[in-house]
Image: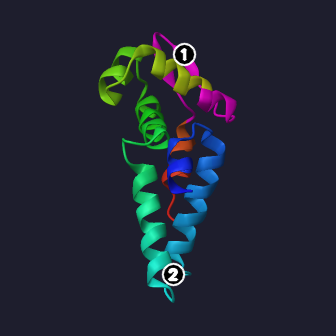
Amino acid sequence: MAANVRNRSDFAETFAVHTALKHALARKLYSGDARTQKAATGLVKSLESDRSIYGRQLKMIGLMAKGASIQQMVKSLRCSRRTVFRYLNHLESAGIGITLEGGRYQVPKGLLKLLKRRN
């Protein structure tokens, strides 16, 4: 299960799982089961890492919150231009409004706060 979520590119679905896990961990819902808590913590860390598609998409959103060019995203994510465009398409498919102004991609200002909000 963890590998499937980590390697999927459906941002909206993975965001829902990530948010639910963070919420459960913050509310200590797994405190009675150390094994489940450890698994949930590991999955959250794995999802947020640069090794997961979702983690790289989160990083991309952070870059676009400041206004980032394709080249900046390629360099920061250490991937190809094609991969950046694929991630942009995934994010747009998830309903994230991405705009292009002066060669810089941007997302709405409040989006980063929503994604980083602690539960």
Q: Is residue 119 visible?
A: no
Residue at the far top in the pictured view: 102
Q: Residue 22, percent across and down? A: 52, 65
101 and 90: which one is in front? 90
Q: Is residue 58 visible?
A: yes
Residue that label 2 marks: 28
Tell me the colour scheme of the image.
rainbow
Residue 68 highlighted magenta (yes or no): no
Q: Residue 71, percent across and down? A: 35, 15
Q: Residue 107, percent across and down? A: 55, 31
Count residues near mark 1 (Cα–Cα under 10 Å), then give few for <14, some for 14-19, many for 20+: few
Dot 2 or dot 1, earlier in sequence? 2
- How far, Cα to Cα, is label 2 from label 1? 41 Å
Which residue is painted at 56% across and 69% down in the image?
Answer: 23
Q: Which residues are magenta?
A: 90-108
Disc nearest the viewer among 2 and 1: 2
Which residue is painted at 51% across and 42% down in the image?
Answer: 7
Which residue is painted at 60% across and 40% down in the image?
Answer: 11
